[in-house]
Image (cartoon, rainbow, N blue to C red):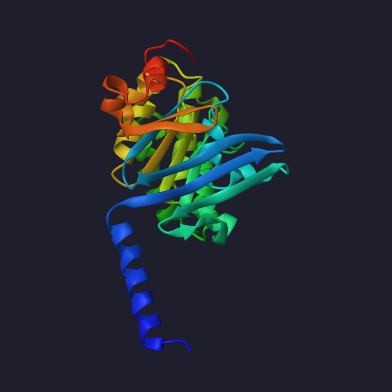
Amino acid sequence: MVNPVRNKKLEETSGRNNQETISNGVKFEIHDLNIWFGPAQVIKHVNMEIRSNEILSVIGPANSGKTTFLRALNRLNELNTNYRITGAIELEREDIRGIKVEELRRKIGMVFALPLPLPLSIFDNVAYGIRMHGERGKKKLEEKVEETLRQAYLWEEVKDRLSESAFKLSGGQQQRLCIARTLAVRPEVVLFDEPCSGLDPISTAKVEDAMVKFKEKFTIVLVTNNVKQAARVGDKTAFFLNGELVELDKTDRIFTAPQDKRTDGYVRGKFG
């Protein structure tokens, strides 16, 4: 016979535990994550936490599983028909497989390596997602577009050319425009997949400055092959090798006193 009093206590305890995890700042919990594409296993038994309002840098050589891990966080890997996953990824204690994909990707935005502006004006690139979420008022749209372009450190450069095609912007400006478009729908998490790989040093510095500022409002996961970039912006750094999470620690410790010799070898440039 079910004891309703005991069940109520268990529910209360579970609810407290959930709230404690969220209040303690854990955004993602990853439990024994394994990922395959066909017969090839590319992520192997990954367990980790990602905390709110921090930048997690993910580093590792080519084919280490970095981008696959990143794309798993908002279920982009599911676009591949050969994809298979075991384990769990929880967003604030909710399994992401139980969240509608559209809602999940609103909460977890992504910025890709190559800027992909829409074939629209600068203004309409940013306003696109805002309109998709129901905002139609001209004044509100203008306010949100300006606010978001300021967040992406782009407003001063484009405020007098908002009606121009986004394709007239430089590569670095296009990337910051794509960042603004992602931020416009108010995500909780922003995933960056090599966002500076094709940018010059000045544009890279602006994107990095923006990321550091973003963490006041967002959780950020940054995949980068540039270990110096990981060291500059990451609060914590995760080192992946052959699909395994070798080490996760505060960034200064990863780069000055790593616990695993493989991490030490990679950050010193001995391989990769």
* Vertical order, 181 against 7 (above or below): above
Q: Is residue 3 left or right of residue 80?
A: left
Q: Nearer the viewer, residue 135 or 101?
A: 101
Image quarter of residue 72:
top right
Image quarter of residue 99:
bottom right
User: Can residue 52 be seen by looking at this rendering?
Assistant: yes
At a point 53% along the width and 57% down the height, the residue shown is: 103
User: Can residue 203 be seen by looking at this rendering?
Assistant: no
Q: Nearer the viewer, residue 255 or 242?
A: 242
Q: Nearer the viewer, residue 213 or 120?
A: 213
Residue 164: x and y in percent read: 53, 33
Q: Nearer the viewer, residue 193 or 246?
A: 246
Residue 234: x and y in percent read: 33, 31
Residue 87: x and y in percent read: 54, 50
Q: Is residue 47 left or right of residue 210?
A: right
Q: Is residue 124 left or right of residue 79?
A: left
* Vertical order, 4 against 210 (above or below): below
* Vertical order, 9 against 194 (above or below): below
